[in-house]
Amino acid sequence: MTGDRPAALGPVAPGKASLLARAAGGDAAERLRERRLVREVQRGSAQALEELFRREWPRAYRAAYLVVHDAAAAEDIAQEAFLSAVRAIDRFDRRRPFGPWMHRIVVNRAIDVTRARSLRREVDATAADSAEAPPDPAATPLSNDVVAAMRELSPEHRAVVTLRFLFDYTPGEIARALDMPRGTVNSRLRRALDRLGELLEVEE
Amino acid sequence: MSPATEDRLRSRLREQPLPGEGEAAARSWPVVEAALAERAPAARPRRTVLRLALVAALLCAGLVAALTPAGAEVGDWIGDRFADRGAPSAPAFAGLPAGRSVLALNASGAYAIHADGSWRRLGGFTAAGWSPHGWHVVGADGHRLVAVTPAGTQKWSVARPRRVHHPAWSTGDGFVVAYLEADSLRAVAGDGEPGTDRLLRRHAASVTPAWRPRAAGHVLVYATARGGLEALDADSGLTLWRRSGPRSRELEWSRDGRRLAVLSAHAVALLDARGRMLRTVAVPGPARQLALHPSGRRAAVVVGGAGGTRVLDVPLSGAGRPRRLFQGDVAGLAWSRDGRRLLLAWRDADQWLVLGRDGRVRRALHGVSAELGSAGGFPRVAGWCCPG
């Protein structure tokens, strides 16, 4: 899978800094606070980690859910992203923002999980019946809403919509986060929005 | 898409409540926190000048915190945090994977633990097992064999002159329950009808008999008092096969009923459905418990010995040697029905752990003894619904 390697720990491509800075979602004070939290986590502070968790968990879970549409899988994906962050925290470059790295891991992993599930369904429909966690009743379609409409898209299309509208990434930033050409992002975004437009405007 | 629809999309994606959002955070935080505790902090050079600068900066920050709105926000957050510490915590078992219940046993009896963290005491059982679809639990209570619902409602009981133990509900249709009375193997119908209770064999060892899944009829394997194994048709009483071997400690079929894992003191043996040996894998140290992966291709085995108690991942197909999966005093373990998770009862830390297939801890449930009342002691995992 792609996106497992923390972007902020390795060489950063030109323009990556802008992606990271933008998606940090805040002003300079926020950035300073986040940097301080990361430093304290590196020193072993559970309190700092808790604050970082509180800040980032909702968006990580939401991003995963919007791609996989399964509460248990979204929980696993978001949790694994945090565990990866904690295990790699000593090597984390504090000049880079933390959030975008999480988003990238979460979204890429969510795409992988969704693809794997689709494949399993194709090869063995009976295996799905014996899944450990049957669909959460609360996770069944939320009628007449955007989240339910997202379910109609492919995982790749859900991912670009999530990055664009949940995190406000530009198409160029999405292309770098998902390791794909910018043109592909634009076309996926256009198709996804056309489809969502049909679904939502019919509902309206 | 119109700009208005685009705005609606943006706001709904950010604000629409999602299922499981809060509960997921509550379950995941302890796991993330534990990962920080497990990590060895990196050594960092100490620099006096930097430390002095840090002290000065902290003093300034303190002043800012006292005098500015932003500082007040931080103060509020800290206040909230301390308030949280005093609030009732989530149930210890709330971190169980969704969907399936777990059967636990301690000195007080048996408990059905549900994925939302709620639990129900089922009775003062010393041994218990799920029915194939999890609609009932069968338990041994002194001289009685008792069937209850997971809500604790008794459905039937059978009284015997001698102590009953090691019950096992048949897989598939669930029409038969096998159990031991002293050293006799017996069976009764799944509805507890007294007229159906019958002796199957004498001189059985104290090992839970294993029903073969997907068999034609009701096929049962049990350990004989002499140390061998016998498979029999529980409906006709006919012997299907016998074999000798080391004394068994646990027996478990793969979900497809094609492989039988037999745990002895120092090895895991894998037999086919006719009792023929497929392979034997030696384990270092005395083996205590077995959890066969539903695929039948690997097993988690608890072993003791000089290296301390640990859980080994024992491959039962292909190449590979047993490797350590977990170190610690484990009291019961079970695979999830789909084989994606392994649940361990870790007595040393008073925790239950949910491991992924790679052995990584996915969830840690703290304080499980206190959750069920400390009188019963640590609860061991006796089964993860459902055998199927």
Image (tube, coloured by chain):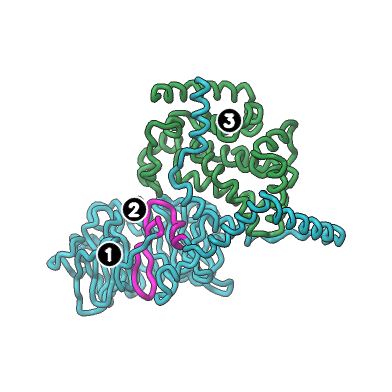
Chain colours: A green, B cyan
Q: What stretch is highlighted in magenta?
A: B90-117
Q: Name the residue under label 3.
A: A164
Along the line of sight, the residue nearer the viewer: B126 or B267: B126
- Give the number of the mark in front: 2 or 1: 1
Label 2 or label 1, whichever comes before in sequence order: 1
Task: Let me know if residue B101 appears in the view.
Answer: yes
Quote the CA–CA distance across marks 1 and 3.
50 Å
The spot of residue B150 in percent (x, y) is: 29, 61
Q: Residue B369 carries which label?
A: none
Disc 1: host chain: B
- Give the number of the mark in front: 3 or 2: 3
Quote the CA–CA distance across marks 3 and 2.
49 Å
Classify residue A43 by image quadrant.
Answer: bottom right
Q: Which mark is residue B257?
A: 2
The reply to whether discs 3 and 2 touch (Cβ–Cβ < 8 Å) is no
Along the line of sight, the residue nearer the viewer: B63 or B30: B63
Residue type for callout 3: Arg
Above/below status of B304 relative to B97? below
Task: Let me know if residue B247 appears in the view.
Answer: no
The spot of residue B61 in percent (x, y) is: 74, 55
The residue shown at (67%, 35%) is A22
